[in-house]
Image: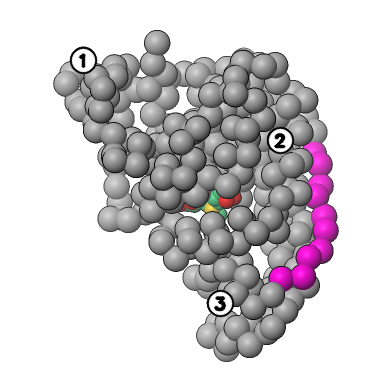
Amino acid sequence: MSILICPICKKELENRGRSEVCSSNHSFDYAKEGYLNLHINKNSKAPGDDKIMVNSRREFLNKGFYEEISKEVNSIINSKLSENYKVLDVGAGEGYYTDKIAKISDKLEVYALDISKEAVKKGAKTYKNIKWFVASGLEEPFKDKSFDCVTILFSKLFQEEFDRVLNDKGILVVVSPNRNHLVDIKKVVYPIIKYENLEPQEELNEKFILEERKNVFYKKIVYGEDIKNLFHMTPYRWKSPIEGVKNLERLESLEVTVDVNIDIYRKKEK
Ligand SMILES: C[S@@+](CC[C@H](N)C(=O)[O-])C[C@H]1O[C@@H](n2cnc3c(N)ncnc32)[C@H](O)[C@@H]1O
């Protein structure tokens, strides 16, 4: 049975070859790359990350700079869940981490969702072992309690929807930047550094309990093109002073601090 629901009327979607159709006859066609676009409530024409961000992220991540994060996420998923399970990666981007998760076992069914068509298109072209959807994390096109695990890496949190699509024993894995993450870029780009301490626990507190937190901390030297790619895959791209960006572009190398928290949450009992 399908776990997909129609984004318009919320009825079950039924597969008819290259399309998914609900009983109210709303129909959605698979793109040639294999993804399904179920995003309907658009406030902007091209929401989410654009092509430059998506391509920069693909280049940077494929060089293995964040491999330690991916390994830790996989080890957590492996230790917490049994063999046959469904995973949803929300805000999956171009799918670097999602693909690594899917490779834990061929008994896993892995779904990836992102609001950015550019990201989903790129992911779906490369990683055929994953089911790809353009959709918002605010309106996830899946039935209640469909997943054993929801992962969210460096993306927005959608507490209500995570709670709805996870089954009662499910886990929510959240990867978020800690205090010193990429502080070296901030030091080059900004005249004064603000240490933002985003605390996912506060945002998830109503529906979820933090079960475990792991910190991944290391430093790596990044060179030329890769510094640019790293900069363009982060939100700093939108909010940096021009002088600061020029300083960064002049660098031949930069030692970069990776400092992220990997949290495991469980649903609160109702
Ligand atoms: C910083 S990127 C992280 C991508 C990927 N998880 C990774 O770590 O490589 C954040 C992603 O969230 C997506 N995004 C932003 N708003 C979203 C929303 N409302 N629903 C789903 N995805 C969203 C962006 O398009 C982008 O691909």
The residue most toward the left is 25
User: Can you identify the residue that label 1 sits on?
Assistant: 23
Judge by depth and name the residue closer to the eye, 115 or 159: 115
Q: What colour scheme was applied to this rendering of the protein?
A: one colour
Residue under the point 77% across and 25% down: 79
Q: Are marks 2 and 3 in contact (CB under 8 Å)?
A: no
Q: Is residue 239 above or below residue 215?
A: below
Callout 1, which amino acid?
Answer: Ser
Is tag 1's residue or tag 3's residue first in the polypeptide sequence? 1
Few, some or many residues within 10 Å of mark 3 (<14, 14–19, 20+) = some
Q: Which residue is mark 2?
A: 74
Check if residue 33 falls in the magenta segment: no
Mark toward the viewer: 2 or 3: 2
Residue type pointed to by label 3 = Ser
Q: Is residue 80 above or below residue 177?
A: above
Query: Where the C terminus falls, by quadrant?
Result: top right
Residues under labels 1 and 3: Cα distance?
Answer: 49 Å
Mark nearer the N terminus (2 vs 3): 2
Q: Are marks 2 and 1 in contact (CB under 8 Å)?
A: no
Q: Residue at x 52, y 64 (%)?
A: 56
Q: Nearer the viewer, mark 2 or mark 1?
A: 2
Prevailing secondary structure class for the magenta stretch in the rendered image: strand
Q: Using the numbered discs, state the Cα–Cα distance from disc 2 to disc 1 in whole angstroms.
A: 38 Å
Q: Which residue is mark 3?
A: 240
Q: Position of residue 153 (x, y in %)?
A: 61, 45
Report whether the residue tagged 2 is closer than 8 Å to ligand 1: no
Q: Are there few (<14), some (14-19), or many (20+) residues within 10 Å of tag 1?
A: few
Mark 1 vs mark 3, foreground winner is: 1
